[in-house]
Amino acid sequence: MIPGIGTLTQDTLWCFSQVKGTIEIGTTEADIISTVEFNHTGELLATGDKGGRVVIFQREQESKNQVHRRGEYNVYSTFQSHEPEFDYLKSLEIEEKINKIRWLPQQNAAYFLLSTNDKTVKLWKVSERDKRPEGYNLKDEEGRLRDPATITTLRVPVLRPMDLMVEATPRRVFANAHTYHINSISVNSDYETYMSADDLRINLWNFEITNQSFNIVDIKPANMEELTEVITAAEFHPHHCNTFVYSSSKGTIRLCDMRASALCDRHTKFFEEPEDPSNRSFFSEIISSISDVKFSHSGRYIMTRDYLTVKVWDLNMENRPIETYQVHDYLRSKLCSLYENDCIFDKFECVWNGSDSVIMTGSYNNFFRMFDRNTKRDVTLEASRENSKPRAILKPRKVCVGGKRRKDEISVDSLDFSKKILHTAWHPSENIIAVAATNNLYIFQDKVN
Amino acid sequence: MFARGLKRKCVGHEEDVEGALAGLKTVSSYSLQRQSLLDMSLVKLQLCHMLVEPNLCRSVLIANTVRQIQEEMTQDGTWRTVAPQAAGRAPLDRLVSTEILCRAAWEQEGAHPAPGLGDGHTQGPVSDLCPVTSVQAPRHPQSSVWEMGGPRENRGSFHKSLDQIFETLETKNPSCMEELFSDVDSPYYDLDTVLTGMMGGARPGPCEGLEGLAPATPGPSSSCKSDLGELDHVVEILVET
């Protein structure tokens, strides 16, 4: 508890743990991280990038000798999930960028995850192999077929240990079901189905069936000229397999119950906050567009991220959020410039911690923000190479809005808008966070006393 | 020099005039900003049809912004109807709605034969495509600004309708409009020019942003590549129809 650090004594102190990725200035676009996700135990951490690759990190066992280093994450498996494709009908490229990764709960020794690009969802199986069968009858040691005429004896192949090999195999490919770009996938709590959502439709899949999916939401108007709203994110309820929510570009959230009808075009609940007339501008609608929606682990709340705020909603109250947190309100006066350079369309994600007491989201200049829902305190931290000494405590950052700029503060005009933190993840039970800063993945942990 | 009373009167009068001028300045500065926001938005929409596969959410949000501006300008009375030569076409509010702008080929047919062609606009690849699009192509029932395959060939027509709008609006507010669009010529719609301006990084004000879109000479190799790509694309679409 050191005074002057900037955080009040009761708050968590965050320390740098690891950074993955290159330091080179010339970043290839393919290396830009586009999604980050811990699995259900936190043992594995997956990232997807613009080049269609998935990299999985595994937490090493904690050793008694190094108490201060709580299990580091090391590369476990790397594979090419999606390749670029060309849609000949429309003469358009289909990007291989991984939009989302979602883990399935572990049911056997293998790990399963869903990864998706704009058009195709794939189920990958990641499994370990540490034994190899030896002593085949029909094949020799190099795998070449033996002439059956030369075989005079029979033997039973035996399994012999080998170096650990982690292999990823595509088990299912769920294709050709989306006309528009997939923005979300969500595994249902029944572990048998999942949904994929694009700009106008949401489809329900069974993991075993790849040539069919059920369309459960369709907001495409009969006349496309009347299109004014799109789906921006969707998620299943963590416990109720019949319930899901989806958010829209108009800042609304709809909760649907699949028991009500096959096509959930009529919502069960409709969450929308009345507009503040004093803040109205031509950009009001754009900044109200929800870029991410997440259920709390408890299933009681949903959190939404729009351009300037994070909001927490109680499922039982539709007319307004119960909490609103300002992420970077100092940008409100810069909306025109941000519209011009397209930053206003950046889609930031948001995450809950394991106990639903703290929420986190990213901002510009490689800043990310955490809000403690109980103490109502917030902190701004930065993912940068300068703060990358092992176990270095992250110093809270502050953006100065106007007037005198104190030392260590940064003025709004000095913010680097090309350094944006769109994707973050929080370990399901511990205070370990993964923050994607362009092509680098930072892992931070809370200070171990 | 002046009697006190007179001087005061002069000062008072000046203040009134200044106040009125300030009021006018505020109003016209708002209009200017709103106009440049409208232009920026229209360019963004046009750009988005040129990209690999447009982000639908972004397009919808920009289109809604354009509609909002248009509604406000309609209420202000600063949005006038187009000349009657557009008779037989859709009413004004649809003329400037974004769908029309991006899909103007079908609206242009008959009543308005491709004005962008003959008047010497050197648009490069796009003008070569114009004859293709202004042919009386049957209207795609499904096609609209949001259909990916549709809008590409409309760049030429988009230029035409944008041109009409600018003509219309120019008569509103001659001084500032002329200033704004004085150097907006055919190269304004050149993709590279626009991209140079748009991707130039954050700029402080909307008007300055607009200045940044002033014509620049595009690289020859890039337009050649896009030539072939567009031509292929257009041929494919024609073959489909």
Image (tube, coloured by chain):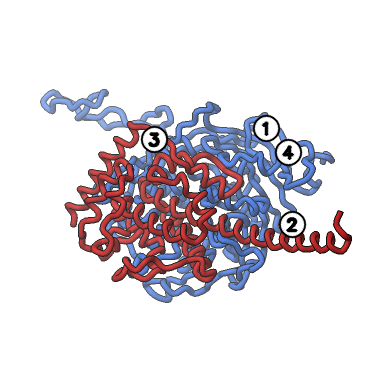
Chain colours: A blue, B red
Task: Mark 1 or mark 4: name the one nearer the start of the chain.
Answer: 1
Please indicate whether residue A307 sits to the left or right of residue A162 in the image. Answer: right
Please indicate whether residue A235 sits to the left or right of residue A67 in the image. Answer: left
Report the Cα–Cα distance between label 1 and label 3.
42 Å
Report the Cα–Cα distance between label 3 and label 4.
46 Å
Residue B218 image label: 3
Q: Nearer the viewer, residue A276 or B160?
A: B160
Q: Nearer the viewer, mark 3 or mark 2?
A: 3
Which residue appears farthest toward the bottom when viewing the image? Answer: A260
Q: Nearer the viewer, mark 3 or mark 4?
A: 3
Residue A395 image label: 4
Q: The disc numbered 1 marks a residue on which chain?
A: A
Report the Cα–Cα distance between label 4 and label 2.
19 Å
The answer to whether residue B231 is visible is yes
Q: Residue at x 60, y 73 (%)?
A: A319
Q: Which residue is mark 1?
A: A387
Residue B123, x across and y down, in percent: 33, 43
Q: Do discs 3 and 2 belong to a common subunit?
A: no
Q: Residues within 10 Å of mark 4 (few under 14, many from 20)?
A: some
Residue A61, x across and y down, in percent: 58, 36
Report the Cα–Cα distance between label 1 and label 4.
8 Å
Q: Residue at x 32, y 59 (%)?
A: B104
